Image (cartoon, helix red, strand yellow):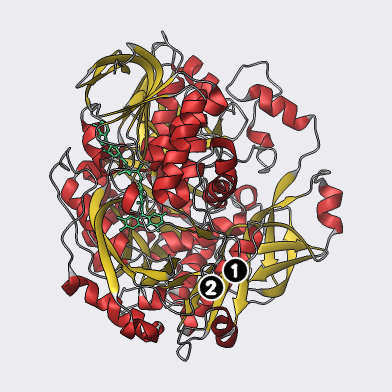
Amino acid sequence: MTLPAHAEAVVIGGGIIGCSTAYHLARDHKMDVVLIEQNRLTSGSTWHAAGLVGQLRSSASITQVLKYSVDLYKRLDRETGLATGWKMTGCLRLACNADRWIEFKRLATTAQSFGMEMHLLSPAEVKSMWPLMEVSDLVGGTFLPTDGQANPSDIAQSLAKGARMNGAKLFEGVRATGFEIKDGRVVAVNTNAGAIKCEKVINCGGQWARQIGAMADVSVPLQPVKHHYVITEKIDGLATDIATVRDPDRRTYFKEEVGGLVMGGYEPDPIAWTQGDVPDDFEFQLFEDDWDHFEQHLREALARVPVLANTGIKKMIHGPESFTPDGNFILGAAPNLANFYVGAGFNAFGIASAGGAGWVLAEWVAKGEAPMDLWGVDIRRFSDLHQDRRWVAERTLEACAKHYTIGFPHEEYESGRPRIESPLFRRLKARNACFGSKLGWERPNWFAPDGAEPRDIYSMGRQNWFAAVGEEHRAVRERAGVFDQSSFAKFEMKGRDCAEALSWICANDVARAPGRLTYTQMLNSRGGIECDLTVARLAEDHFYIVTGTGFRTHDQGWIADHVKPGLDASLRDVTEEWGVLSLMGPRARDIIAGVTKSDMSNAGFPFGHVREIAIAGHQVRALRVTYVGELGWELHIPIAATGDVFDALMTAGADHGLVPTGYRALESLRLEKGYRAWGSDITPNDNPFEAGLGWAVKLRSNLAFLGREACAAAIHAPLKKRLAGFTAADRDVVLVGRETILRDGKQVGYLTSGGYGYTIGQPIGYGYVRNSDGVDDDYLSSGSYELVVAREVVKARLHMAPLYDLENLRVRS
Ligand SMILES: Cc1cc2nc3c(=O)[nH]c(=O)nc-3n(C[C@H](O)[C@H](O)[C@H](O)COP(=O)(O)OP(=O)(O)OC[C@H]3O[C@@H](n4cnc5c(N)ncnc54)[C@H](O)[C@@H]3O)c2cc1C
């Protein structure tokens, strides 16, 4: 065996993900690909997977990725001559209580929204499909007919053969041992059999991906966790095409295998494997059987399928799989090493994901841009926090334990907290704040009234904080509220060519006079929205950029990746240097005038401006913007002074009814005002014209910017979808997102955001209305609308203007 000295792309890892990525790179992009596997193909986690293939996820794009897998597994054998064992058995999910049943009804609506069939079944119908099952404890079940099962090793070998047929070279027994990095790019992969020079590297190292990443200083936050299932002897009467079963209330799953059952589960107390390095020679290996730990699953399985009591167990499969802190896999370009890609951390659904994950990862590698909205799995959703292995392990075990628990809306993780406290943490806690956490930051979600406990009590209907958040909302609309938004990600760009650099990256005109700030999107080459942020020009050669807490790594990476070479424009993350207080509401000016000598009048400090002002003896950077539709300022304060400024505002605001307010009120306020949220309402799948943000695109100027051609093309063709607001006529309906939109009784889209507006007193949703012949104002206004909410059809109204628009900025300025 002689390794080539060069390859365009080197894929590390010969599990199902590496094989799929190599296959797609070679087949779709004709790339010169080398795959190296340290042991033998499939010998990591792939060979011992159970082989259930489900498709439905809460994100439309990820569901599309999984659907692609099924389409591929169905036909791959015809292409390669190697069978995948694919059987479209369908999947039954079982509900044993009322909350689970609501969750399933919402799930079935999500399936409808994403163009999939999912049926709701009575216990008797479940029984007729699966006669060996005990159903007396069931409320009902769902059936997704296009799910199925396959043989993991066979799929991987079939993909490997397909890769070879398209010219990829696959080598077993070759281990990546390090990387040569020059000018921020990998130029060669070192192996135990020599170096391979290359243009791109893809780390598909499964549970080894963390340590492979570490060799290039790329953080891949995952934790190997032990996972197990058993295979039974043959069971009389079990059909070979019987549906796979997920029984989440009993934390177990089932699949037919050679006349018997595979039965496994996700326990509430999962066990992490090593927190050191995974041994290189862990090849086709398993852990010792752990019957004590597995007993909980056996007990539940026996209650569900009583015939198991008389059925022998052939063997236990007890192996490692990599899990991640949020239960989603990890894909994309490393933020700090542009040509180093990752496809890892598959949380026990790597077989289901592999076909599609390899397809989108190959697109990403070949074109340098994700082909669709993959934010939920993007490696850039993590931050430095995720380099802390103990924290990652703790959070990962919590996520893993939640694999089968009911997913309540607004649920927060509990482990590894508090991690990052803003300077106001103690003050806000003393005021009865109930905190949530975002990228490690503790942030006030809401404030409990005196005497009440600041704790979320989750439910499928209105939750215990509903009334308290209503009070905060009203305070902001009628008086003023102050939000601690210190967790905002903040960057400074300095240098002679900043304006030129940002002008290219931003869709709006940000190269305005010093003292101005601009709301802008950053677009990909398809015109899709990659970032949504505020850019303030502080001086000719100095910009200040503010974006959402969770988008820190992503947006910094996007900006850094797109500064044209040779420009004098250096970007620095200054998040921890600045606290942020957003003072919002009609009394905001009266309050701030009480703490600063600066001119805060509308003439002296108009909307869209940034000024340095002094408060409580501290120099504060005040940005006149709003995300709630009220008069207000975002005050960016040197972090150590945040407490002083907060105290000064609270004192000055006492007579004006100022109260501290939280993120749940912020969400309600922004929904009424129609402000878009990146990641849900606006994503890389949506262009600004579809999103109603065309006014923020500098198409009328002659300035070049990334995405300009796509935008120009978009406005010259009918838009095939447009974002609209909706209110539900039934005030008690709970909207959470993904509800189906019906126009004149026909499905035209689904909600991207859902919530409640306390000023208008109605549930609010946003979503794209789609029509292949075009969506214009007439089309929108001529339809009559309904929403499908947890399978119930409710009357709705469509709104193109903000639901709350007092024009108060003008009226009250
Ligand atoms: C008990 C169990 C049941 C499961 N059941 C299911 C299921 O029903 N459905 C489902 O979808 N998923 C299931 N999974 C999950 C599934 O097995 C994994 O998600 C999937 O196999 C991950 O594939 P991979 O290619 O990322 O990793 P792996 O298969 O582990 O491949 C990674 C490869 O990288 C190689 N490698 C590592 N370091 C190097 C290096 N330095 N140089 C070269 N090569 C290297 C390794 O040797 C390994 O072969 C299950 C997992 C377990 C443990």
In the image as oriented, which residue stretches furthest toward the top? 566
- The answer to whether residue 224 is left or right of residue 769 is left
Local secondary structure at mark 1? helix
Residue toward you, 625 or 662: 662
Which residue is depicted at the point 41% across and 8% down? 566
The answer to which image quadrant residue 492 occupies is top left
Q: Is residue 634 visible?
A: no
Instruction: Determine which of the numbered discs, if any, sits on residue 138 in the image.
Output: none
Residue beneath disc 2? 104
Picture layout, residue 669 above or below residue 157: below
The answer to which image quadrant residue 260 occupies is bottom left
- The answer to whether residue 767 is left or right of residue 187 is right
Local secondary structure at mark 2? helix
- The answer to whether residue 527 is left or right of residue 778 is left
What amino acid is at disc 1? Ala
What amino acid is at disc 2? Phe
How much space separates mark 1 and mark 2, taking CA atoms?
6 Å
- The answer to whether residue 184 is left or right of residue 98 is left
For label 1, count other residues whose C-alpha is less than 10 Å away and answer few (under 14), some (14-19) or many (20+): many
Residue beneath disc 1? 108
In the image as oriented, which residue stretches furthest toward the bottom? 136
In the image as oriented, which residue stretches furthest toward the left? 276
For label 2, count other residues whose C-alpha is less than 10 Å away and answer few (under 14), some (14-19) or many (20+): many
Q: Is residue 62 visible?
A: yes
Residue 780, position as x, y percentages in the image: 81, 53
Which residue is depicted at the point 60% across and 49% down? 809
Residue 601, position as x, y percentages in the image: 51, 42
Badge 1 vs badge 2, beta-carbon distance below 8 Å: yes
Residue 357, position as x, y percentages in the image: 47, 41
Q: Is mark 1 within 8 Å of ligand 1?
A: no
Residue 586, position as x, y percentages in the image: 53, 57
Q: Quadrant of the N terminus?
A: top left
